[in-house]
Amino acid sequence: MSEFVAPSVVKTDEQWKQELTPEEFAVLRQAGTERPFTGEYWDSMQEGVYECRACGAELFTSREKFSSHCGWPSFYAPLADGTVRYLHDTSMGMKRVEVRCAACDSHLGHLFEGEGYETPTDQRFCINSVSLRLKQDRQAD
């Protein structure tokens, strides 16, 4: 787990509720999960940069996206070190690693390792579509 760095985007729940839809708020700010195979990007392979839907921070690119067939967008690495942060998550009776936006501390999804995917990292960042916004006219360097 990485050392905690305070988010650069800080808002009250009331401010977030004014800016996000109820579904976005439930996932991004209350660590909810969208239903599998329902999100906008779970099977999309369009090129571009995926930003945090809450604050616009660039988090992942289409180059690291892969088909895991799990029902949520999957990436084998974030765009760069420090764009996401990790927390221990013991909710729902499981030991997991929660992935959050480093800029605004919004919940994105979870990180799984050692599942045997043929990716450079053998990691699967299982991210909610509702936590992301694809910018197709952008491509990370």
Image (cartoon, rainbow, N blue to C red):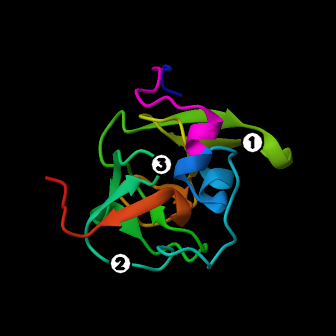
Q: CA distance from mark 1 to mark 2?
A: 30 Å
Which-is-in-front pick, marks 1 and 2? 2
The x and y percentages for residue 72 are 57, 69
Q: Is residue 22 above or below residue 106?
A: below
Q: Residues within 10 Å of mark 2 (few under 14, many from 20)?
A: few
Q: Amino acid at mark 1?
A: Lys
What is the three-letter code of the residue carrying label 3?
Ala
Mark toward the start of the polypeptide (2 vs 3) = 2
State the CA–CA distance, disc 2 to disc 3.
Answer: 22 Å
Q: Nearer the viewer, residue 101 or 53?
A: 53
Label 2 belongs to which residue? 45
Q: Vertically, is 84 above or below 25?
A: above
Q: Which mark is residue 95?
A: 1
Q: Secondary structure at mark 3?
A: loop
Q: Is residue 34 visible?
A: yes
Instruction: Give how far apart the Cα atoms at labels 1 and 3 are.
Output: 26 Å
Q: Counting other residues with Cα less than 10 Å from the Cα at mark 3, is it few (<14), some (14-19), or many (20 or more)?
A: many
Mark 3 or mark 1, which is nearer the start of the sequence?
3
Name the image quarter holding residue 126: bottom right
Query: Which region of the structure is painted magenta?
Result: 5-16
In the picture, measured across the screen, residue 83 lies left or right of residue 109, that is left
Which residue is more in the foreground, 30 or 20?
Answer: 20
Disc number lying in front (1 or 3): 3
- Give the x, y percent position of residue 130: 54, 63
Question: Which secondary structure, mark 2?
Answer: loop
Looking at the rendered structure, the secondary structure element under dot 1 is loop
Q: Which residue carries the number 3 mark?
A: 54
